[in-house]
Amino acid sequence: MSASSPDDHIQALSKEIDQLHNELAMIKLQRKDINKATRDMIKGLKKASNKHKKLNRSYEKHKEEMWFAILAGNTAIATKAEQKLKRVIEEQAQLQRSLPDQYKSGAGAIKMMIESKAKRFEWQLKIALKEEEMHRFKPCVSVTCKHCKRIDTTALQKAKVAFKDGVMKMLKAKVK
């Protein structure tokens, strides 16, 4: 059994990070599709709501028309208004029957959206942990670490000292 070298472990971590990034990209695409479907469902619910308001206004208008026709004694207009009123009531009933299904599908889409958001956060956390692990095995040489997004104060201090030493050497060389 051969011992794996640190370079092999770093390469394995790099491959895992690449796979996690690919999975995260797929999750983001799925989330984009879910968000689009949710927006479409919300548009459908708004249309149904607007149609319901329109039917309510129409119902009130035809009811008023029917009562004025009855008071005036005009039975022909009253029967037409009554037929219009029945048609509006049937449309309202049909709309009311379809709304629960729309609400259920909307709730399902919102649930999927929340789950995909949690899943995306989970994968981002996994990627951050793998990058942190990789950083422990292969520390960054830069003053600011791009993996863990922390400023290494000792490296910064060493860079300042090296810069001051370089400036002092240059000034001494000019004076001579």
Image (cartoon, rainbow, N blue to C red):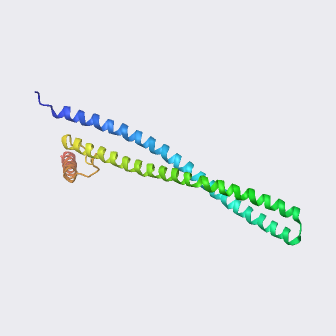
Query: x%, y% of residue 170?
Result: 21, 46
- Relative placement, left or right, of 176 versus 129 is left
Along the viewing direction, whichever of 17 and 155 lies nearer the viewer = 17
Q: Is residue 112 visible?
A: yes
In the image, taking residue 2 as reference, residue 120 lies left or right, namely right
Quick one: 148 or 58, which is closer to the camera? 58
Name the residue rendered at 23%, 41% in the picture. 134
Total number of numbered discs in the rendering: 0
When asked about the image quadrant of residue 20, the answer is top left
Please report the residue visible at 44 percent of the width from the left and 48 percent of the height from the top.
112
Image coords of residue 13 (percent x, y):
25, 37
Rendering quarter of residue 96: bottom right
Say which quadrant the N terminus sits in: top left
Quick one: 85 or 174, which is closer to the camera? 85
From the top left corner, tell me how far across and down residue 11 is, in percent. Answer: 24, 33
Looking at the image, is 152 positioned above or below residue 77? above
Q: Residue furthest bottom?
A: 71
Residue 10, how many percent across, how many down? 22, 35
**Residue at image point 24% right, 45% down:** 132
